[in-house]
Image: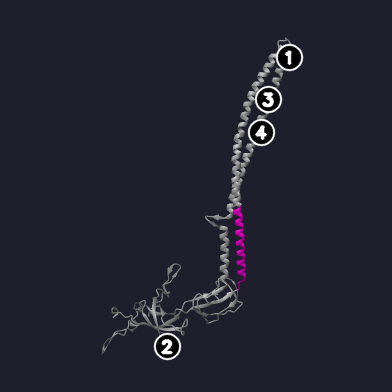
Amino acid sequence: MFVLEPPVVQRSGGLHNVRAPRIRPQTDDATVRANFVGVAPQVNGPIVELHVRDQQQVKEGDLLFVIDPRPFEIALERARATLLLTRTEVDGLKNGAATAVAGISKAEAQLNASAADVTRREMDPVVADAEIARLEAQFQGADNHLKRVEPLLPEQFVTADSVEQARTKRTSALAALNEARARKNAAVATLAATRAQHVATEAAVQQARSERARAQDAIGQIEGINARLAAAQAAVHSAELDLSYCRVRAPFTGLVVNMNISNGAFARTGVEVFTLVDTRTWYVVANFRETQLRHIPSGAPVDLYLQSQPSKHFRGTVVGLGWAVLPENGTSVGGLPRVERSLDWIRLAARFPVRIKVENPDDSFHLGASAVATVSGTWRAADR
């Protein structure tokens, strides 16, 4: 069915358009509205101070109530103490890292000296081999000479002194050769010990480097930020924030409503204690028929009356039109549209909410109060 339009009637003074609902759309299906929030704490605890009462007007920043701050003060002191301990630990770790760096420098210097010592000691066996070769030649010569002269002594071709002198020379050459061989053995042993010391020095350098890496990791320094200190400082900031949440203040100027608590009540995080109505701005939400919406542009002036104050005129301005309402039929069930089998012979026009800002509200405005709204100055020549 279609909604029938009001007729145009002829009167003696000319045409009189009786489409008043189009020229000045009016509805008594209107309600006073205001923004409001539920005041809820962000920390748990008993309420120790209550600074407001029901229906009290408060200003932005006014103290509403206080939650017992003592547990949060203790938590803050603990976080601050942890921060001090962390700073001390980080300083100690930095000193340890500096000591590790110095240890690396010392170990590397010892390693360089050890490498030079190994290189020098490696020449000692070579020199000893050359000396042994020379002394072996001397011994061989002395031994050969003795073997030549000894058989000549019975023939008296040589004197006994010459033979004794040859024997002495051979004995001295053999002693020098044995000493050279002993020196070589000592040089080889010293070289082995020096190489072992060099290996130990290399291990010490690696250990010093590992200790430095562990010390630097323990410090927690990452790209100019110390993670350990940052975490401890964040814990302090979190504790300070929790302590500040103990004092709950009004987020805006408004009216306290639905307050049903007293001192000692246990407040829980996110659970509303009471409601705060924003009295800075009042609205009227008026439901107009869909046939009237095209005659209600945004910014149009509106005459408002409260049913509690029928003789008092208030001014308003259209803020915007509602673009959606929940349909009675045609909803989806299981992903498929649902269409009623019944058909009403009379189809009423749907109503859409229109938000109207009140320009001159006073103390007579109450959230949820009934009102009458008349939109004026909206008839256009194209509608004639």
Q: Pointers 2 and 4 in contact (CB under 8 A)?
A: no
Magenta range is 68-95
Residue 305's spot in the image, x, y percent? 41, 85
Query: How many C-alpha atoms fall within 10 Å of the one at disc 2: few (<14), some, or many (≥20)?
Result: few
Q: Nearer the viewer, mark 2 or mark 3?
A: 3
| Label 2 SS | strand
Q: Which residue is mark 3?
A: 176
| Magenta span includes 266 | no
- Mark with earlier residue (3, 4): 3
Question: Quadrant of the image for the C terminus?
Answer: bottom left
User: What residue is at 60 percent from the left and 67 percent from the top?
Assistant: 76
| Label 4 SS | helix
- Mark with earlier residue (2, 3): 3
| Label 3 SS | helix
Q: Nearer the viewer, mark 4 or mark 1?
A: 1
| Label 1 SS | helix
Q: Amino acid at mark 4?
A: Ala
Q: CA distance from mark 2 to mark 4?
A: 119 Å
Q: Which residue is mark 4?
A: 189
Residue 137's spot in the image, x, y percent? 64, 21
- Mark with earlier residue (2, 4): 4
Q: Which residue is mark 2?
A: 310
Residue 60's spot in the image, x, y percent? 50, 76
Q: Which residue is mark 1?
A: 160
- Mark with earlier residue (1, 3): 1
User: What residue is at 56 percent from the left and 58 percent from the top?
Assistant: 227
